[in-house]
Amino acid sequence: MNTPNDSRINVVFAPASSAREGDAILSNHDIVPPPGVVVIVVQAAPGRAAHVAGCACCARPAVSGLLTAAFVAQARAGRPPFRRLVVDAGEETAAALRGALESDAFVAGRYVAR
């Protein structure tokens, strides 16, 4: 749980319809966002080439990379800033996100589940 001084982005698992202006939505299906809402799309990964066992791109879950990219884009002002991430995705994506929040230092330092 975050504290009043916690600057992490709040993550909520809810329907996209609960998003409001200034939020971002992470979704693995087509949605029409309300005005002022950023959409982060999760897509199925295409087949991967053979990599060395345990390489960084394979050992780190794809959702971690996605959340990292979203945060960096926000920090570089490439996207409107958002303080809340509404996750409207299947259970597999939600489980991967929960895992990233628990085990990925970069993600856990910037996002917090509510």
Image: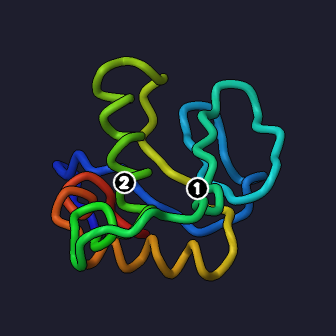
Q: Amino acid at mark 1?
A: Val
Label 2 belongs to which residue? 65
Residue 21: percent from left, percent from top: 62, 32
Residue closer to the observer: 84 or 92: 92
Residue under the point 23% across and 45% down: 7
Which image quadrant is residue 10 in?
Answer: bottom left
| Element under disc 2 | helix
Outermost front residue? 50
The label on residue 35 is: none
Residue 102: percent from left, percent from top: 27, 78
Residue under the point 36% across and 61% down: 64
Q: In the image, is residue 5 above or below residue 74?
A: below
Is disc 1 surrounded by few (<14), some (14 to 19) or many (20+) residues within 10 Å? many
Which image quadrant is residue 35 in?
Answer: top right
Residue 43: percent from left, percent from top: 64, 56
Residue under the point 69% across and 59% down: 28
The label on residue 86 is: 1
- Classify residue 71 as left or right of residue 95: left
